Image (cartoon, rainbow, N blue to C red):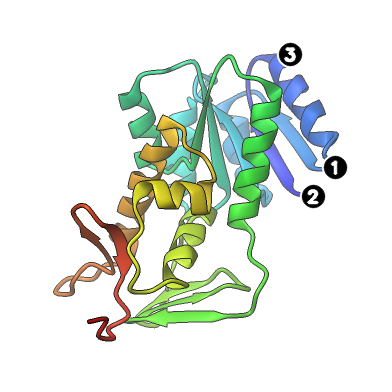
Amino acid sequence: MAKILIVEDDEMLGLSVLTALESRKHVVELVSNGIDALEFLRNFDYEVVILDWGIPQLNGLEVLQKYRQKNGNAVILMLTGKSDIRDKEIGFETGADDYLTKPFDMRELIARVDGLLRRARTFKDDVLSFKGVELSIKTKNVLVDGVEVSLSAMEIAVLEYLMRRPDQYFTVDDLLSGVWQSASESSEHAVRQCISRLRSKLDRPGREAFIRTTKGLGYRIDSGRSIG
């Protein structure tokens, strides 16, 4: 069970999504515009936000930007009629975790929500630590040089995946199957934008990138040990 906020101005679609999610035993709330969305996000905690791009007052992208600026870390699934890749890139750059293009099958939406929740939730007490970055799997807190930084749930899921497997390379496809469990074109952009956001939050001036990239091999976190 998760607490989910739907932000959708199409009343019939919003109610259909709400009913489908409630049938999965989730606690679901529905609002129809950007102002109300920010008010709910300010006052309540959610694990997942299903956010339509084309809502009135403030559009979905503006809501997403303001929410992430306030360090909101719920998983964001964007709904949109926009199929242009550049629009999707903008959404991911702003902080979306996944995309679903209208019209969609409700079964796909449920599958994506379930997948995002599985990736985002953590269950163990481990503290993973490399080169000044610490991740507490239980609390989801991330420290860089002892200072807490705010990451979204999906950013934490990707960081955990890499930190549990130091000195190994992972391609975009590896991360898609290991974290997103999806091979959609939009998810390929999600991987790249998530890595970019992680770097902007974890890297410090004068140091090599915490998440390294080698052409033809992929991404890795270097533990500092010699791997020969």
Q: Residues within 10 Å of mark 1 (few under 14, many from 20)?
A: few
Label number found at residue 25? 1
Label number found at residue 90? none
Q: Say which amino acid is labelled 1.
A: Lys
* Residue visible at 40% across and 34% down in the picture: 91
Label number found at residue 12? 3
**Image side of residue 23 versus residue 93, left or right:** right
Give the camera-side residue of 225 and 120.
225
Give the camera-side residue of 172 and 8.
172
3D distance between C-alphas at marks 2 and 1: 6 Å
Q: Residues within 10 Å of mark 3 (few under 14, many from 20)?
A: few
**Image side of residue 219 versus residue 151, left or right:** left
* Residue visible at 42% across and 81% down in the picture: 129
* On screen, residue 16 above or below 140: above
* Residue visible at 67% across and 52% down in the picture: 45
Q: Which of marks 3 and 2 is nearer the N terminus?
A: 2
x, y percentage for residue 17? Answer: 73, 26
Q: Do the residues labelled 2 and 1 touch (CB within 8 Å)?
A: yes
* On screen, residue 98 above or below 106: below
